[in-house]
Amino acid sequence: MSNTTATITLHGNSTELPVRKGTIGPDVVEIGPLYKNTNSFTYDPGFTSTASCESKITYIDGDEGVLLHRGYPIEQLAEQGDFLDTCYLLLYGELPTKTQKADFDYRVTRHTMVHEQMAKFFTGFRRDAHPMAIMVGCVGAMSAFYHDSTDITDPHQRMVASIRLLAKMPTLAAMAYKYHVGQPFVYPKNDLDLASNFLRMCFAVPCEEYKVNPVLARAMDRIFILHADHEQNASTSTVRLAGSSGANPFACIAAGIACLWGPAHGGANEAALNMLAEIGSVDRIPEYVAKAKDKNDPFRLMGFGHRVYKNYDPRARIMQKTTHEVLGELGIKDDPLLDVAMELENIALTDEYFIEKKLYPNIDFYSGITLKALGFPTEMFTVLFAVARTIGWVAQWKEMVEDPAQKIGRPRQLYTGHAQRDFVPLAKRK
Ligand code: SDX
């Protein structure tokens, strides 16, 4: 604990606020006593300068383009480990030993099936329902099936719920895809790793054997690693806020899925691919760059910019490399969308506007091209993001529930509405 303090002087009164140092990154000013001492709130819509919690899980240095999970750089996790390593690391805080990994793999694998009654939910949706709408509904409904892991005060139930969510999200996502394309559901197979199982549940059909392509499975696994967790982003903050009321973990993750869906957040991967398709060819890029710079035009370059990264998103670099690997493996020589994406990146990175505003490609810029090449429709892109981010949401939710200092999240406001006034009977209203 540092003995540094920050002094705030307001209406002639001064108050000393404690300053806390993290392991790395900016200090924080503990403003808890502010209201009691000064009768004033802080005001920070969008939380641009606000730390909502203390966490040991993920650290981002936006200026340097650094992303660490429990201290390990994302580049090393993505190149040298697999998604199960990252899941274990986020949940337990350390990389698993061989025995721990085998046990974790066994536990996750044996929770991949969903209750058979859940299949009946799907027939209630239209076939053209957006798969994210289906995921919000089905994941929230998990609390109707898994009552024995909703008591958040029980560490065993918290862990069972965490494993169930990690294991069943790929199955539900694959079911949402199969329902969307009108094909029969495919059950998980226990002898496949998570990414291979997921690809098989999505793309296998009863009429022929499905052979997992190891290069594509490795690419899928790496895409899951890249999307696993990302500090206190909007959907993770949603999960934490929902969890702070004591809501069950399935309801909290459903809330996170709903928030991720927005085009400013996880929905950007779907929006970025649609944008690349709308631009269509390299010669139309200048027109769209001009629109993105026009203050009167709401259009933004989807997949560009970030609240924290004011440098290249390290995940986008790895994603771009994965895109080339997948296109190469599939023999896709020239993908017009990739041509547009790479030329758009070149133009944007040398454009004054983007340089001045420090706008770089983020993880959503290249992911859509890769996911489309893997065979997914654009509507599934954010679902895949949700499948991967579930481990991050669950790890952050667990950390929040287990934090002795945690209390229900209840922000205040700057009120600019009417002062008190008297009711006007209908007959007297003008
Ligand atoms: C994700 O938080 C996370 O960690 C999220 C995420 C995760 O892993 O959880 O990383 C995943 O959500 C990545 C971001 C995906 N979203 C998009 O790609 C959508 C396009 N990007 C923007 O909407 C925007 O950049 C945000 C929402 C990502 C960040 O917005 P901020 O931090 O609120 O920044 P801002 O909107 O205040 O923009 C600052 C300036 C503005 O101009 P001025 O008002 O200062 O003149 O930059 C401009 C913006 O107009 N700007 C853009 C732009 N992004 C910002 N201009 C054109 N195109 C863009 N993409």
Image (cartoon, rainbow, N blue to C red):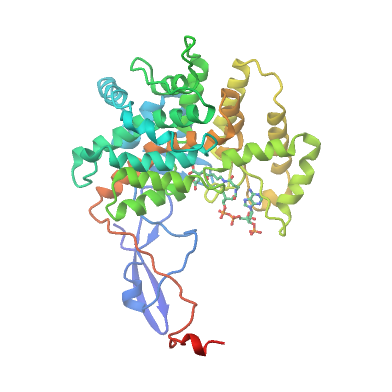
- Residue 26 in percent (x, y) is at 43, 54
397 or 168: nearer the viewer: 168
Q: Is residue 96 above or below residue 71?
A: above
Residue plotted at (46% across, 44% down): 60
The quarter holding residue 80 reads top left
Query: Can I make out residue 56 in this image?
Result: no
Q: Determine the residue positioned at 37% across, 39% down.
A: 139
Whether residue 253 sits left or right of residue 211 in the image: it is: left
Residue 24, placed above or below residue 111: below
Residue 212 visible in the picture: yes
Q: Residue at x 29, y 41 (%)?
A: 144
Could you say where residue 13 lies in the image, as x and y percent from the top left? Answer: 37, 82
Q: Nearer the viewer, residue 112 or 389?
A: 112
Q: Residue at x 30, y 49 (%)?
A: 400
Q: In the rendered view of the protein, which quadrant contains the N terminus? A: bottom left
Q: Picture coordinates of residue 362 (x, y %)?
A: 57, 41
**How far across and down, in percent of the image, does residue 74 sit?**
46, 33
Q: Is residue 194 above or below residue 25?
A: above
| Location of residue 175 by image quarter | top left
